[in-house]
Image: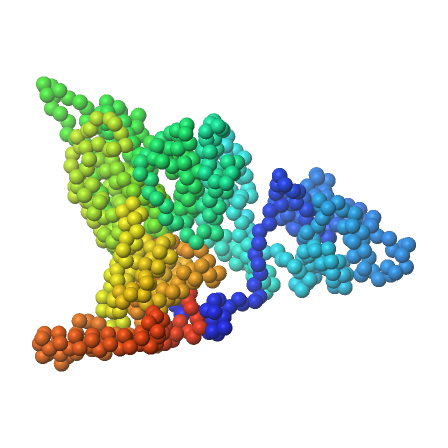
Amino acid sequence: MSPPTPSSSNPTTGGFSVPQPGASLLLSFSFRPSPYSQPAPFFILGSGPLAAQRAFAAIEANASVVILGKGNLENVCEELRWRVNHGQVSWVDLDQFSDITHDTELVNPDLVDTFALDKYFSGLPPSVSPKFLCITDTLLSTTTRRSRASALSIHTLCHSRNINVNTTDYPDLCDFSFATTYRFPDLPVISGGSSSAHLPTNGGALQIAITTNGQGCRLAGRIKREIVTRLPRDVGKAVGNVGKMRALAKERDRDAKQMFPSIFGFSGPSTTEDPEELDPCADTDTAPTPNSPIPQRPGRTVFIQENGFSPDGETTADRTRRRMKWVAQISEYWPLEKLAAMTEKDMKGYLEDEGAETETKAEVDPSVTPIETRSSCMATTKSELPPFSVPLPPQTSIHSIFPSPPNTIKPGQILLIGSGPGHPSLLTIAAHRALTELADIVLADKLVPAAVLALIPSRVEVVIAKKFPGNADRAQQEMMERALREARKGRCVVRLKQGDPAIYGRFGEEVLYFRNPPPRSPSTTTPAVDHPPLPPTLVIPGVSSALAAPTMFDIPCTQRGASTSFLITTPVGKGGKMLDMPKYERSRTVVVLMGVARLRSVVKTLIGSGKDADYPPYVPIAIIERASMPDQRVVESTLEDIEHAMESAEVGAQRPPGMMVIGWSVSALWGDGNVDVLSEGDDGEGETSGKCASEGTGILREASKTIEAEFREKNEQEMKQSEGTKIGNSEDVRRVRNWLGDGVRWRVREGLASTWDLFNIDSE
């Protein structure tokens, strides 16, 4: 992967990205009527097949379409004539507004339609004042093509009336253009209720648009087809399901408000606000990250109290905000195929307040037969038998003359597996076999990428943890309880985590829970049941993202001459508590996991107040997102500029999951290399020089002290020369300037090298 050109090399740009002219501002318009105004019609000049295409696109956008032509409907193409006759579009004959027989000045035929349009527009009421006009009869391939002089005259008229114009095959006479689009079908949500009956069955909410900025319309069509064929066939249904889920996230609280109008309120400036308006960034692309930290919910709630608060202290508005954030998380992390397969029952379950599932009746009541507890939505096991179908041993008396039958329930097994940083080829062989051959059910964390989940056979049930903001602790408990229940049924349970499970993966909590399980689930009040002990949990290590992610961008955690050690930490403690960050050591690389959402507080803590133990503001930092995935990205900057970089137009929204790498190793391998950061005697491998090592530890210790003292004195002198500020070390500032570029404050690199295609793994 070749490094991209830096954003800017000119100090006068302030380090911000330099706009590159020639692009199009891609906007999407909807002409749906609102309670406050009626959208102006969409006007189309022309009556051929292209006009029919433009009309159809406008109709699908809920626009009121007006076709402007000449003569009667016999001169109109068949499709437009049908739509006019069936009331889908309106027809205006411009000949009715032409007056050339009484005005000798209108001898130029190129001005006839201009004056007719001017007269027609002048007679329109303000409520239907035109905003868009599409001229379609300038198509190059037609024999009756409108002249350029006529098109230019109409374009000038429209500009005088603030009307945006699109002129076919005349790019210089276009204020807007039409992208090559595709609309994915959006099938109804599978549900027994009537609430999903309104969803369309052909055209859906998802549309994609491709533009070549006028450089190749035919090629744009081909690129569109390439993209469409590479997306899942039911991706449109996934979008429809997310839309339905967003409505369900607000539906319960809206219904409760109607039930208790005098006591049920939303916190905010107005009690009549839509719950979604209370948090406009809950499920849009304007939020920098869907992982914005919010307090953990301490308790569980199953009903709404009449005072407007839930038993765990949440107001109704807080609960609605939380649900909308959960929808955003599901949209961000879950595989498209899983989103498309959601039923309305699934959606309500994902948004349910209760965190953990209850135990099934069969687990606590041996008298219940297996058929009464069978779940129709569960996948079959490798023996093609549904779960819960293992026969339970009958109850026998100790005085019976018949021997008790042997216990036919096979012992279950829990496998705790690390999925690596993301690319399926970075799975270990053991993890791959567990997922593809051994698993009966997979309980996956939300950060496990879809490419890894795609390797799991379709016969295996996959459950994704609801570790959304404010719900991590509940979701963790839910997954541990589920794993234990499934293993007690004799199933092979794969608990799938990203990276390595022992690196901030709650590995210890789960091992201890499975080793010493509680006598009964805290989510049920039924009597405890004695279960045979399970085999020890098998932990399969994974490639840690903390090490793999920097390597994907040629950033070493240790490098001779730049870093002699590295430290992995996180700013997030139990219950979301902010933790202390490590102090600055010049020779150490710090890898920060789960901290990008708290970037501002992390940077503020690191830079501090300028004390010796604080980080200089010019220290390099890299934020790595979605490492080893096709859309992987790294943003490289300094501590003082990284916030501005992440908020810049060039970077846009964050792409979770992300991590930070802080220290001089970030810039060590850029270009010709920058491996002279540390003192000459430190080779980065614990030796100062061959001579010192041969003369014994005493001399080595003295040499180290001398080097350290000289280095400290040099730094102190440079700090004083810079008036005591952290901008001080002139040599380090030079290093940063050589690394990023003179006047450049950050760099963005993205994309996975095509060579990685050699290691793709085909799914079932």
Q: Is residue 279 visible?
A: yes
Q: Is residue 405 above or below residue 171?
A: above
Q: Nearer the viewer, residue 142 or 366?
A: 366
What's the colour scheme?
A: rainbow
The tally of labels here is 0
Give the percent coordinates (x, y) of residue 275.
48, 39
Q: Nearer the viewer, residue 225 or 514?
A: 514
Q: Nearer the viewer, residue 254 or 426?
A: 254
Q: Is residue 503 left or right of residue 312?
A: left
Q: Residue at x 23, y 69 (%)?
A: 564
Q: Is residue 535 left or right of residue 452?
A: left
Q: Residue furthest bottom?
A: 691
Q: Is residue 559 above or below residue 390?
A: below
Q: Is residue 699 left or right of residue 221?
A: left
Q: Nearer the viewer, residue 490 or 714?
A: 714
Q: Residue at x 31, y 74 (%)?
A: 719
On-image quarter of the N terminus: bottom left
Q: Residue at x 39, y 49 (%)?
A: 292
Give the percent coordinates (x, y) of residue 220.
56, 59
* Residue 102 found in image quarter: bottom right
Q: Is residue 70 visible?
A: no
Give the percent coordinates (x, y) of residue 299.
31, 36
Q: Is residue 688 above or below residue 203?
A: below
Give the percent coordinates (x, y) of residue 605.
32, 59
Q: Residue at x 46, y 61 (%)?
A: 648
